[in-house]
Image (tube, grey):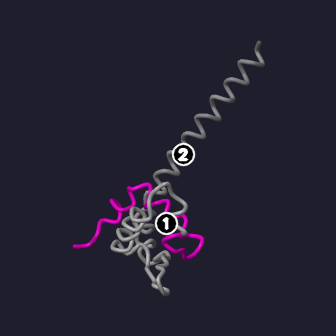
């Protein structure tokens, strides 16, 4: 059964791990040092990310290094892309409303 990527990404620790991995591969120890969690907890989150296909694990001697798996992240981006138009419209409408209110405030101030 495929892992639900969106439930994996719902966890804020996992999202932060992915953010740190944008800068390049990192060891489990490096990643654990960035959190107020123990190394075993960070390792569990990395295992979930690996199972979901969002990161790749590479062993180098006694250490494990993780890096982003761009193909799986691209799938997520492709799914989210159609929603960008919706949010852009909403944000544009909000900006128009704020501009109108600012204009009204200026006009009221000028009449005082």
Residue corresponding to mark 1: 18
Quadrant where the image shows the C terminus: top right
The residue that appears at 51% across and 70% down in the rendered structure is: 29
**Disc 2 residue crowd, few under 14, some 14–19, many 20+, Cα 10 Å:** few
Q: Residue furthest top?
A: 112
Give the number of the mark in front: 1 or 2: 1
In the displayed structure, would residue 102 be above or below residue 57? above
Between 37 and 2, the one lying in front of the other is 37
Residue 6, above or below 58: above
SS assignment at label 2: helix
Quick one: SS at disc 1?
A: helix
Residue at the spot 48% in from the left edge and 56% down from the top edge: 85
Which residue is pictured at 49% across the width and 66% down the height?
18
Q: Residue furthest bottom?
A: 61
- What count of labels does the image hold? 2
Give the residues in magenta: 1-29
Please tell me the numbered disc located at residue 91. 2
Q: x, y (%) of residue 24?
A: 58, 75
Most distant residue in the left direction:
1
Residue 79 x, y percent position in the rendering:
39, 66
Q: Magenta stretch containing residue 11, yes or no?
A: yes
> In the image, is 52 to the left or to the right of 15?
left
Of 6 and 56, nearer the camera is 56
- Please tell me which residue is depicted at 49% across the width and 75% down the height of the picture: 68
- Per the model, the C-alpha gap separating discs 1 and 2 is 27 Å
For mark 1, does the 10 Å Cα neighbourhood hold few (<14), some (14 to 19), or many (20 or more) residues?
many
User: Does 5 appear in magenta?
Assistant: yes
How far across and down, in percent of the image, does residue 66 sit? 48, 76
Q: Compare marks 1 and 2 and give the one earlier in the sequence.
A: 1
């Amino acid at each position: 059964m495929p892992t639900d990527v969106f439930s994996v990404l719902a966890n804020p620790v996992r999202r932060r791990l992915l953010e740190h991995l944008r800068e390049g591969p990192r060891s489990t120890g490096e990643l654990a040092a960035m959190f107020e969690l123990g190394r075993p907890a960070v390792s569990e989150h990395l295992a979930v990310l690996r199972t979901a296909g969002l990161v790749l694990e590479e062993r180098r001697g006694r250490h494990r290094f993780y890096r982003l798996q761009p193909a799986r992240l691209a799938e997520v981006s492709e799914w989210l892309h159609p929603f960008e138009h919706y949010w852009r419209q909403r944000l544009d409408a909000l900006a128009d409303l704020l501009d109108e209110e600012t204009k009204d405030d200026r006009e009221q101030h000028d009449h005082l």
